[in-house]
Image: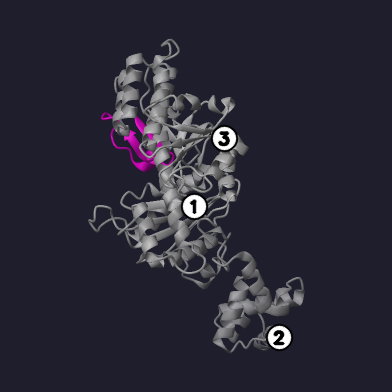
Amino acid sequence: MHVEDLLRLESLDLTLLWGDRPQLTREITGVTATDLEDPGRFLQRGELVLSGLVWWAPADDGAKAERFVAALEEAGAVALLAGEETHGGVPEVLVEACRRHGIAILSVPVHTSFRAVTDTVYLRQWGDLIRRPAAPYALPENVRAELSRLLADGTDPDTLLTRAVARLGTPPAYVLSATGRTIARTPTAPPLPVRRAAEAVTATTTLSVDPDASAYAQWHLHLPEPVETPPRMLHEIAEVLAQHRRASLRRETTARSRAADLLALIDTPSSPAAPAALRRALEACGLADQDPYTVITVKGTADDDGTLDALTEALHHLTDCGVAAGRLPTAEPGEATAVIGTRTRTGSGTGSGTDTIATTLKNLWPMLQSRNANVPLHGGISTPATTPQNLKGALTQARYALTAARSRRVPGTEAPTSNLTAIEDLTTLGALLTGIPADVRTAFGVHALGPLADDTNPSHRMLLETLDVFLTHNGSWARTAEALHLHVNTVHYRIQRVEMLTGRDLARLDHKLDLKAALLCR
């Protein structure tokens, strides 16, 4: 289907605002609805972009529209369909930006829903498949027609899978996520535990539904029993499921946009967000009355774009919790954040408590990490925020715990920190210090230890060792001398030297703590 085909449909009543022949003959591969100011990372090449223009305001300058359209061009979008409802029309600055970047722009009237446009595109795509000669296809024409109808009706994945494999005799079949969630199964397929399902994802009888998705977002068609069928038929069944998957991704993109708005309110740098605005944002994400809330922040690598997919997949395992996952406006590349509503949706009061959230995610983390072993995934989990107004503090906690998780080891120990750390895990001074950025820890150690920080000096190394042992033995002269095989007078002399060089009095508890922290920060 091409862009110009949409203009010919009277039912949509679209108006071309700008677009020449080269733009109008571009082929549409999919549709994404978004109101993000920078939607580029959520788009795939060849997609049609629907936007209600909520991200733009009449007071905005042309640069904002320029950035939006530039993101579409960079992502390879074929056209922009702009809704007229928000502003009573389409801003001229947006039309001009589309002209400069070679992106066709069409206006969508108030009486035409985005759903109508989306359904039209995907029904047309499947209609094209059905009308093609049957020879290249393994699935019969009537089966493809039925599956096309089910997709258009938005049927549930269990029914779609069951009808898709009916031609094979309805064998046991599953659709599994990257970490072993069962998304769909046929009536003949028994429930599959998550760990076994995760192992099945890599089995030879498993076919990837969407190979272009990130390692964390892929779906897999799994048939535990071999079936005698042409491989082409299985691939066509996988393509049917991929169409359903794309519909769910469109809904997920909308949810991520709302989550980004919520996170932007929480991370307001100056004064706290207005309670009414915060409540509206929580309601838009389905998190109203879901308190207490837990915040989790995850970091991958700067050049990896799958971190949000990884976080989203992990949170799908919290079946009793409401979640809103997206990116903060101030997020570094490869960083994603989510707000988790702890109270169950049903109001039963039993759901996943905050302890269960941390336990579930920690148990899942190695499996999630294994899906892309080359990209280390670190995460930090806050304590519960009992009210929406406490969410900013919970975000600060999650970021601190993330920094702790990214530290290579807890100071003073040989044990590495967990890749997923909760604030509740930071119960010692050494663990607490891991949440402080490395350069800050280093600066504190240097200033607190003074000349002793230069451990290239053999005398300084000796004094640091004596100080460490002295503090470890709670300031006991005798036990320190015994541990170092020294005379007590020698220990006294060395500690006096430490006090002179650092300006600290080791008879005082606060000075002992200062130097202990400095040693841990080295």
Q: Nearer the viewer, mark 1 or mark 2?
A: 1
> The residue under label 3 is which amino acid type?
Ile
Find the magenta span and give its range: 172-197
Characterize the local packing of mark 3: few (<14), some (14-19) or many (20 or more) Cα atoms within 10 angstroms: many
Query: Does residue 442 show up magenta in the picture?
Result: no
Q: Nearer the viewer, mark 2 or mark 3?
A: 3
Ranked by sequence position, the earlier of labels 2 and 3 is: 3
Which dot marks residue 103?
A: 3
Give how far across and how far down residue 2 sits, in percent.
49, 25
CA gap between label 1 and label 3 equals: 21 Å
Characterize the local packing of mark 1: few (<14), some (14-19) or many (20 or more) Cα atoms within 10 angstroms: few
Which dot marks residue 497?
A: 2
* Quadrant of res 152: top left
Instruction: Classify residue 145 as left or right of residue 30.
Output: left
Ranked by sequence position, the earlier of labels 1 and 3 is: 1
> The residue under label 2 is which amino acid type?
Arg
CA gap between label 2 and label 3 equals: 73 Å
Q: Nearer the viewer, residue 314 or 506?
A: 314
Residue 237 visible (yes or no):
no
* Quadrant of res 150: top left
Give how far across and how far down residue 504 sits, in percent.
64, 86
Q: Residue at position x 68%, y 88% from top?
A: 496
